[in-house]
Amino acid sequence: MKILDGALGIHGQALAVRTKRLELLAQNLANADTPNFKARDIDFRQVLADTNTQPAAMTATRGAHYEVGEVANPDGTLYRVPFNTAVDGNTVESSIEQAQYGKAAAQYQTTLNFLESRISGVRKALRGE
């Protein structure tokens, strides 16, 4: 798979992050009437940047220190701050979520188009065209 990772570039990882974001937005819409449900989203740029960088190795200077640092939100999910508060504690605003879902779906399709273009280029190279 390492060979394909180089050929496809970052688009494979971007597709996985965009898929996760679409799932979260769909969950938000599905739970729009659930009391105390907190709307979540993903900061796409931050998560993609984190997947491309290797964490720096930490060393303990004393025996009582922890060996590894604590990672905040390893999956990149964030809670959305609502514009209007709801009495039941739900933070989902359907109009905002629908707009975000539409935007995310278009970005997902764009990433698929980039992948299709890359795969087409690999096919042509293998055929010798």
Image (cartoon, rainbow, N blue to C red):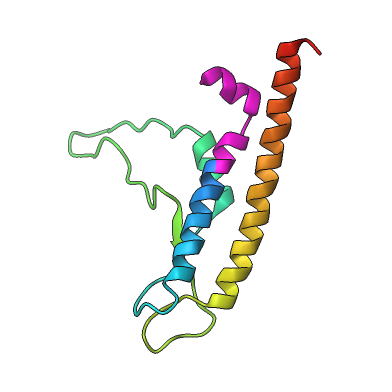
Q: Is residue 94 visible?
A: yes
Image quarter (top left, top right, bottom left or bottom right) of the C terminus: top right
Q: Is residue 39 visible?
A: no
Q: Quadrant of residue 7?
A: top right
Q: Main secondary structure of the magenta part?
A: helix
Residue at position x 51%, y 85% in the image: 84
21 in relation to 79, above or below: above
Residue at position x 63%, y 69% in the image: 99
Residue at position x 53%, y 56% in the image: 22
Name the foreground residue: 108 vs 70: 108
Tell me if residue 6 is in the magenta stretch. yes
Residue 122 % position (x, y): 70, 20
Q: Residue furthest front?
A: 127
Tell me if residue 59 is in the magenta stretch. no
Residue 98 % position (x, y): 59, 70
42 in relation to 58, above or below: below
Residue at position x 49%, y 50% in the image: 20
Q: Residue furthest right?
A: 129
Q: Residue furthest bottom?
A: 87
Name the foreground residue: 51 vs 16: 16
Write down the region rendered in magenta.
1-15
Residue 60 % position (x, y): 27, 33
77 in relation to 89, above or below: above
Q: Quadrant of residue 89?
A: bottom left
Residue 103 % position (x, y): 66, 60
